[in-house]
Image (cartoon, rainbow, N blue to C red):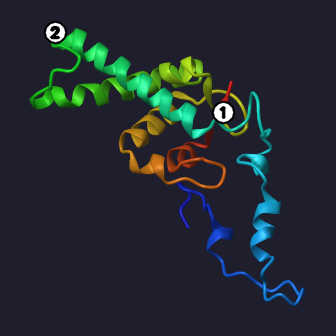
Amino acid sequence: MSCLFPPCYVAAVTAPTTSGSGNGGADAGSEGSAEQEWPGQRLGLPESGPGSVAGWGRRMLALFIDWMLCLLVVSVITGRRVWEPLLGWERWLPLLTFALEATVLTALLGGSAGQLIVRVGVRRLGGGLLDPWRALIRALLICLVIPSVIYNRDQRGLHDLATDSVAVRR
């Protein structure tokens, strides 16, 4: 058991048990749905509206906006056109720009530029903004991609689990 990544999906990988109803555990799968009806319910977050877990559509749109803004910034810095391929070490500039932008804006404003535009906020589970170190770790894990696509039933990726954060609607 890792203290960096708390366990997730423990109930999803355990074998169903018989509940004594005589149906051989056929209703055991419904226990998980009764336990949590929407993402974030067990975290005390509302089902919809401000403070609820942000959906994947908003998050993907925010990432797209962030990436376009980073490409624009890099094109201004390098003097190249936005769609012109970057060569050598310049290939890393959009990713470095994204990491810097996401870290600074998440620590100061509670979300990257794209997240602020689509009204998604990143906050600690206990409330409040992420401190700069947590924002940096979260941004670096997003840059690695894999931690972002492995998530639990609360739609919190490994990057959120590692930094005790959650992406919510504003």
In terms of depth relative to the viewer, which is nearer, 93 or 2? 93
Residue 98 pos. (x, y %): 37, 26
The picture quadrant where one finds residue 103 is: top left
Q: Calculate the distance from the C-alpha at mark 1 to the C-alpha at mark 2.
A: 36 Å
Residues at marks 1 and 2 touching, judged by CB atoms closer than 8 Å: no
Q: Which residue is mark 2?
A: 79
Residue 136 pos. (x, y %): 45, 33
> Which residue occupies the extreme right position in the image?
21
Q: Amino acid at mark 2?
A: Gly
Q: Amino acid at mark 1?
A: Val
Who's the residue at 42% across and 23% down the image?
A: 66
Relative to 158, 41 lies left or right: right
**Residue 29 in the image: above or below residue 62:** below
In terms of depth relative to the viewer, which is nearer, 48 or 146? 48
In terms of depth relative to the viewer, which is nearer, 95 or 3? 95
Residue 85 pos. (x, y %): 15, 26
Q: Residues within 10 Å of mark 2 (few under 14, many from 20)?
A: few
Q: Is residue 112 visible?
A: no
Who's the residue at 53% across and 34% down the image?
A: 59
Q: Which residue is mark 1?
A: 168
